[in-house]
Amino acid sequence: MKQQQTPTSEARAAGLTLRGIVKHFGPTRVLDGVDLDIRPGEFLTLVGPSGCGKSTLLRIIAGLEAQSAGSVTIGGRSVDALPPSERDVAMVFQSYALYPHMSVAANIASPLELRRLSLFERLPLLRWLSPRRPRVMREIMTEVRAMAGQLQLEGLLDRRPAQLSGGQRQRVALGRAMVRRPAAFLMDEPLSNLDAKLRVHMRTELAELHARLGATFVYVTHDQIEAMTMSDRVALMDKGRILQLGTPSELYDTPADVTVARFIGSPPINLLEVEASAGGVIRMAGLALRAPGPGRYTIGIRPEALHLGRAAPGLLAARLRRAENLGAEWLLHAETEEGAPLAIRMTAAEHAAADALIGQVLHLSASRAGVHLFGPDGRRVAVEAAVEAPA
Ligand SMILES: Nc1ncnc2c1ncn2[C@@H]1O[C@H](COP(=O)(O)OP(=O)(O)O)[C@@H](O)[C@H]1O
Ligand SMILES: [Mg+2]
């Protein structure tokens, strides 16, 4: 979970409002009316499978792509008519897009030089004729050094990008976005080029950086773990729509849709088809739940909500196929009588006590909090107070 910190630099954080954003590419509708309110200073993540429209939405916010319909407001100001450079946002891409022939310091300084020096003052030979240029450059370099301090790049300012590690290059790209002090940072899969270990490290760095800056972050990823670990709130997208917007805990504990339930959580939630009785009662893994009516439902059971027990009526029977030792935890892979796969997660102590052997039939009960019910349309169904469960 994120820790609250007091921003050290004066915060420039804008809220963003998206209303009815639609985007067509030719006949294909890739965004289907997106409404979203992003709060000033929050870390909001757009997460969803590849192709669901995350990058397109971010590019529309940045002004790099024009929406077919709908409006974008940044800091209370409509930006629909503004080019990217006037929207007061900084985009950080997955490819680092650094100037390879320039030092780290020059890379970070470049947006400030562009903004504060005239074209004449930036020309290779003529720039030396400007009487104010040395003073402006000293000011810029002071800011670059302060930025390098924040990003732990102090010792690297004279290097070229090729002499840096992937994580260091990522920080330089961030620094170049940060010196402009934008009202919001837009990041499209910024960690996807890094190796697994560095990605984990950069998750912490980005979350800490966000807390320090107090700026608004809009972050795009297809990786649910990135979304869950860094964000204040997550917008889960599928097929050009937001299926659910909420805190990481809200998405995990009360998924609004079976697609959300399937996407969030590792290992993924177990999904089983069940039939409710004429009275709407569903019996599953020792629970008796009352659905709104009879018929077919999908029940979702989190792997950690399943517990091994002794053979008893009403428990879910599944044959153990494989057991993975994850150190502090075990992950069991089993198969129901109908052939549905089941993942069961437990502590090492529980596993030791259970003495479960491969090939053996397990008898599983479920805890209510990790069980979710979805209707034929995939939407979450309210389950009324559990009914009495006669044996
Ligand atoms: N310039 C484009 N022209 C045509 N189709 C595009 C273009 N950009 C994206 N798309 C399509 O729009 C959909 C959403 O793409 P994108 O926003 O990049 O998804 P994501 O970032 O979630 O993976 C995809 O089906 C993609 O192929
Ligand atoms: Mg993308």
Image: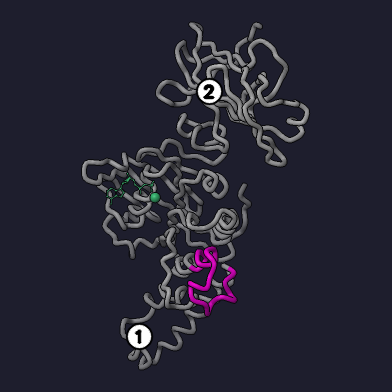
Q: CA distance from mark 1 to mark 2?
A: 69 Å
Q: Which residue is located at x 58 percent, y 61 percent?
A: 212
Name the mark on residue 121: 1
Image coords of residue 372 (percent x, y): 54, 25
Ligand 1 is within 8 Å of the C-beta of the residue at disc 1:
no
Q: Secondary structure at mark 2?
A: loop
Task: Report the colour scheme.
Answer: one colour
Does residue 135 sit above or below 363 in this rendering? Answer: below
Residue extending farthest to the front is 359
Give neighbour class at mark 1: few <14, some 14-19, many 20+ (Cα, 10 Å): some
Q: Which amino acid, mark 2? A: Ala
Q: Which residue is located at x 55 percent, y 57 percent?
A: 206
Residue 346 or residue 187, whichever sits in front: 346
Residue 205 or residue 168, whichever sits in front: 168
Residue denoted by label 2: 340
Q: Which residue is located at x 69 percent, y 32 percent?
A: 346
Image coords of residue 230 (percent x, y): 55, 50
- 332 sits left or right of 348 in the view: left
Image coords of residue 279 (percent x, y): 51, 7
Main SS of the magenta part reads helix
Query: Does 165 appear in magenta?
Result: yes
Q: Which amino acid, mark 1? A: Glu
Quadrant the C terminus occupies: top right
- 127 sits left or right of 195 in the view: left
Residue extending farthest to the left is 26
Image coords of residue 257 (percent x, y): 46, 30
Residue 226 or residue 293, whichever sits in front: 226
- Write down the region rendered in magenta: 152-172
Residue 184 or residue 65, whichever sits in front: 65
| Pair 1/2: label in front | 2
